[in-house]
Image: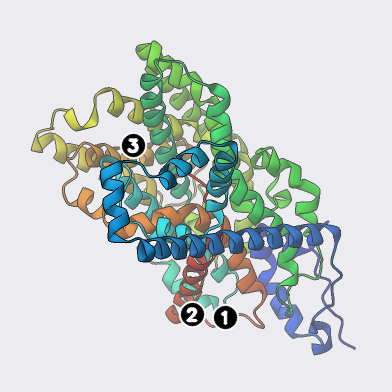
Amino acid sequence: MDVCPQNSFGAHPWQATLPSIMMELKDEFLLANSTNALCHQPVRKKLTTETLFMLFAILLFVILTLIRSALSVYERCKAIGKETHSSISERKEKAADGATYAEEEKKLFETSIYAVFLTNLKKILDCFCIKSNARRILNTVSTQEQLSSLHGIRAIIVIWVLLGHVSMLYLSAVKTPDKVQLTLDLQGTQIIKNTIFIVDTFLVLSGFLNGYLFSQHYEEKKGNISWLLFYVHRFVRITPMYFIVLGFYSTLFPYLSSGPVWPTYNTNPVCKENWMWHVLFINNFNSHMRQCLTPTWYLACEMQLYIISPIFLILLMRRTKIGYVLIFLCIYGSCFINFIFTKQDELIDGPQRLAEYYSTDLKDFQRRNWEYFDILYSKPYSRLGTFLIGIALGYYLFQKKATTIKRRSQAMLSLGWTMAAIFMWISLFALYGREESVLEIAVYNGLKHVLFSISVAWIIFVCVTGQGGFFNRFLSSKIFIVISRLSYTIYLTHMVILEGYFLAKKDLIDHSTGAYGGVLTMVCIVFFLRKLFLIEGGAE
């Protein structure tokens, strides 16, 4: 008699975390397909208290969306009606006599408490308006033309995120590893495998905007900064979307589909036990097997770096030389920590050696990769140098007034681009095809984040100062503005969509370019549709 699979991985079901999905997906498919089909009938799940609460929250969200959209239609109809019924004589009378009774009445109304309340309510409801959200997303006008190239960098990086994470799960669900091995052996695939540098680019951008905009605000306020608002503004911008996605993934995700490997639990047990780590933005200090939605480690890491950023920002504004010295020492310290931890714990250099282990010992490689994730990859002390490079650049460009910075000679620009290309090549390909050496990997892990970040900082520098030429024109393309505005939504939701896609499948995937492209296309389509209904969040 066939035995149904147990759907467990240690203390929790294997579908509850991304690492266990990646490690167990193929084996669980094979096990499920070898058992009785009766095991795979859809399981009737009871609605838990958490699920009912989330359903209520979504219902409230939908109601607010409908109310605001209906108000938009009403306002539009009212405006058209006024234009239709206004006569030429009334317009002449208004012109001759000045303000009419209606205008006076309107003025009194607008100054009333009731009007102020309605105006504020409307601003709040604007977050739920499908029309205004769609218009905001599709608007290709950059608020600061000088920084428009940042949209291009952010858009390219979020596409890199998609390619990397689609690949991660795709490689865990392929029937024929031999065919995939041929692709992984190509040197060009190092770019997709080295998604670790995505985080460096995001942090350089975040640090740059923090340094640039803080300097601008500090100068406008003459140093009178409201630190409460400094932190509250950040919290309010990123948490609504974050908590919605986290709540959805924890409670409603298990009810969305069924299949031979679809989770049978009601509420994600890992999320239920560890949700407070996420609310406090310290989940990156938790083990990878106890993180509810793994990619959200980045939000915690960036929040921690943002919290300590005033130490460096204030020093730069008041004691510039001391600020630069402290930043240099912290960058050096971050590199040293990465070197020491790698050498001490014999860590690997990230996922770039995947090709060497994919067909032979993939699980052991994944175990070592997640060990690297826990000790170094997700920790703020390993990313501090990257963030500070961005802060220093942002402060420098604001103080020097980017548009008035003296243009470099062609020789200097060529040297800068050459060094940036060399640093980027070292980061991506330096250890490609080499035998593992603990010392080499330790040196590489110590330097790679800073070298890659310097390359990104150079690109930002030449583009913002108008010396980027083709790169500036390309990165400032209007299409990138749309993708950039979707980037926060893409980052938060893409793994939920990917997990749902792969766990709902009936069997492993036959490897082909079309199959890989199909997954990617499906994910991209879903993002835009979801963004129309979700509250704006994240940095823009």
| Circle 3 crowding by C-alpha within 10 Å: few under 14, some 14–19, many from 20 | many
Q: Which residue is mark 2?
A: 515
Q: Is residue 165 above or below residue 94?
A: below
| Circle 2 crowding by C-alpha within 10 Å: few under 14, some 14–19, many from 20 | few
Please tell me whether mark 1 sits on a helix, a strand or a loop. Answer: loop
> Mark 3 vs mark 2: which is more N-terminal?
3
Q: Which residue is mark 1?
A: 509
> Mark 1 vs mark 2: which is more N-terminal?
1
The answer to whether 235 appears left or right of 292 in the picture is left
The answer to whether 448 appears left or right of 274 in the picture is left
The residue type indicated by label 1 comes to: Ile
Q: Is residue 151 above or below residue 482?
A: above
Q: Residue at x 46, y 16 (%)?
A: 224
| Circle 1 crowding by C-alpha within 10 Å: few under 14, some 14–19, many from 20 | some
Q: Is residue 121 or residue 144 the one in the foreground?
A: 121
Q: Which residue is mark 3?
A: 454
Q: How far separated are the C-alphas under marks 3 and 1?
A: 39 Å
Q: Give percent across and percent down for residue 234.
A: 54, 36
